Amino acid sequence: MKKTVIIGAGISGLCAAYFLKKPYVLLEAKPYAGGLCASFYENGFTFDHSGHFIHIKDKNIKKFVSKFSGGTDEINRNASIYLRNAFIPYPFQANLYYLDEKTKKECVDGILKRKNVEISAAMPFSGWSEAMFGKGITKYFMKPYNQKLWSFDLKKMTAEWTGAFVPKPDAQSIVKSAYSKNKTIYGYNGVFYYPKQKGCQALIDGLSKKVKIALNEKTSKIDIKNKIVYTQNKKYAYDNVISTQALPELIKQIRDVPLNVKKAVSKLICSQVRCVNIGVKSSKGIPAVLKNKHWVYLPETSFPFYRIGVYSNVSAASAPKNSYSFYAEFSSRNGKYKNSENVIKDLIKAGFIRKSDEIACVNVIDMPYAYVIFDKNRRESLEVINKFLNKNGIFSIGRYGAWEYSFIEKNIKDAKAAAEIINKMMHGRAAA
């Protein structure tokens, strides 16, 4: 009997299976579910694939996540930018008060002297940033930080990705923030959620109990003519496919892909990320400079990582007693991460780890698909690819399946939407 084949048991695949009306088969290449939302445990520490802190606005999604996680903590964001040995509250552009006088003046002058141009998300990011925030803020934060984050020419990348991800206070508020402390909470993640126990894996485990998963079933080929998905072990006839794997990997598996689709896929680009997880033992606890901080952005090139996060400040259950835990993120376009082997030395240099503290464990996770690059080719390429896929009953969803910059809430919603489309199609066939 034909069914819906779901490829990938990460958050998107699990939710698609949950919302689908049977029959379906959920295929996962690895021996465990979760994808990049999986957590793992070492020496009493809980680590994620870097910071999977859950940002939710929709109250129904909030209930959904809390239910399947076994309960979540609601956390008020405490994020900072580390610049010139000082911490500036996030977002940089709304907290100029904390800068030295020379840098502050340059940022304020930049705002006041902006060119009067029409601002569009289609602009190159570097030009968009100057038009939106002025030359000073662009110079000290927007340009250096985003260069480290994306590992891509900011003049060739559009500002389309900024959407909800870059807070945009008006010029008056930015200038005001130079002379008095800002009290407004900016950004989509001012409040976030995290499972009370077991890390992000708690959500994965809760969903996994409600769906059936075929583990160790890596797809190798998709025959769209005969509607068969092949794995190394079996073959599955299908009516529809929901794929959550990275879009280029999906296209590689499909037989007889038209040339225009292959060309479109070849234009999709992304950065890679290395996450270094570190568990630290210390009877003194975490250094005072990082007390209560959840994550820190590092725009300066003297630090090779662009961001650190402190798991144990988000959830005390993430680390054993008298311990604390980090992740540090490095970006690359070629899979090479310069100076990542020096991460502990650099964290000590910044005062984020004491020399006397004991490193309990270190592990490294490389993510070949991390940040999708928004350039002039992306939108047109996706239109070509999705037209081909949808014509053949294939829905490509999730951060890398949809080839977008997204978060868990949107992944859940998109999975539900895809499932509902298929449910209606199945109902229509049954009625006929």
Image (spheres, rainbow, N blue to C red):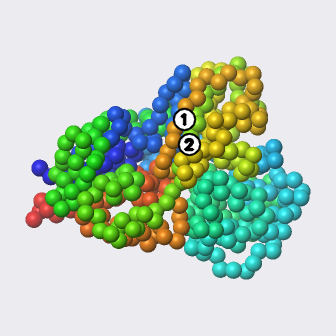
Q: Please indicate, yes or no, whether residue 176 appears anywhere in the rendered image.
A: no
Placement of 250 over or under 366, stated as above or below: below
**Marking on residue 274:** 2
Residue type highlighted by circle 1: Val
Q: What element carries label 1?
A: strand
Left or right of residue 57, residue 11 in this image: left
Mark 1 touching mark 2, by CB under 8 A?
yes
Residue sitting farthest toward the right: 101
Q: Is residue 348 shown to the viewer in this render?
A: yes
* Camera-nearest residue between 338 and 367: 338
Q: Dot 2, how many residues are within 10 Å of its Cα: few (below 14), some (14-19), or many (20+)?
A: many
Numbered mark located on residue 139 in the image: none
99, 353: nearer the viewer: 353
Rendering coords of residue 51 (x, y %): 56, 42
Query: Which residue sits at x=44%, y=72%?
Result: 380
Q: Where is residue 287 in the image (x, y as percent from the top left)?
A: 74, 30
Residue at label 1?
A: 364
Please state if 431 lies on the left or on the right of 14 as rendered. Answer: left
